[in-house]
Image (cartoon, grey):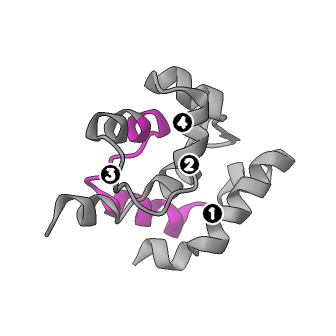
Amino acid sequence: MELIKKLDRVPPCMCRVMARKNNGRQVLSHRDIAIASGISRSYVAKISTRNTWSGIRVDFIERFANACGVDVLKPSKVKQYWSVSKAYHIKHASKPHRMMFAKIFKQRPVAEAQG
């Protein structure tokens, strides 16, 4: 299996959905992720809704995913989160974050991301 195909089991948009703080109760902002990763806020915003890692440098993949608290090489952790989580951080997100999540889920439903 190609590395990109393996990484795309947990694409940037799903990493972004998983990014949370305060024991999973709050959404990480683009700014939070930018600071943690050392990637510009505008680039974080750009890749946050992408469905593939294709075209993104490996060092940015690692930094972005780590800042979001996701191990892209262990997609079972993401699946496990969705099976037991109440997604509190999504349900109680600010309007801009809810709009971003709606865009992400419209292009990639959670059920597809789990599979």
Q: Label 4, on which residue?
A: 43
Which region shows up in magenta? 64-86
- Disc 3 marks which amino acid? Val
Please tell me whether residue 65 belongs to the stretch shown in magenta: yes
From the top left corner, tell me how far across and down residue 68 is, in percent. Answer: 48, 39
Label the magenta part by its dominant secondary structure. helix
Q: Which residue is mark 2?
A: 48
**Do the residues under discs 3 and 1 have CB atoms within 8 angstroms?**
no
Does 92 sit above or below residue 59?
below
Is the residue marked by circle 2 packed among few (<14), some (14-19), or many (20+) residues within 10 Å?
A: many
Taking the image as drawn, is residue 22 in sight? no
The x and y percentages for residue 86 are 65, 61
Nearer-N-terminus badge (3/1): 3
Give the residue number, with chain letter if any, for mark 1: 104
Q: Which circle, 4 or 3, is nearer the viewer? A: 4
Q: Disc 2 on helix, strand or loop? A: loop
| Mark 2 or 4: the one toward you | 4
Most foreground residue, 97 or 49: 49
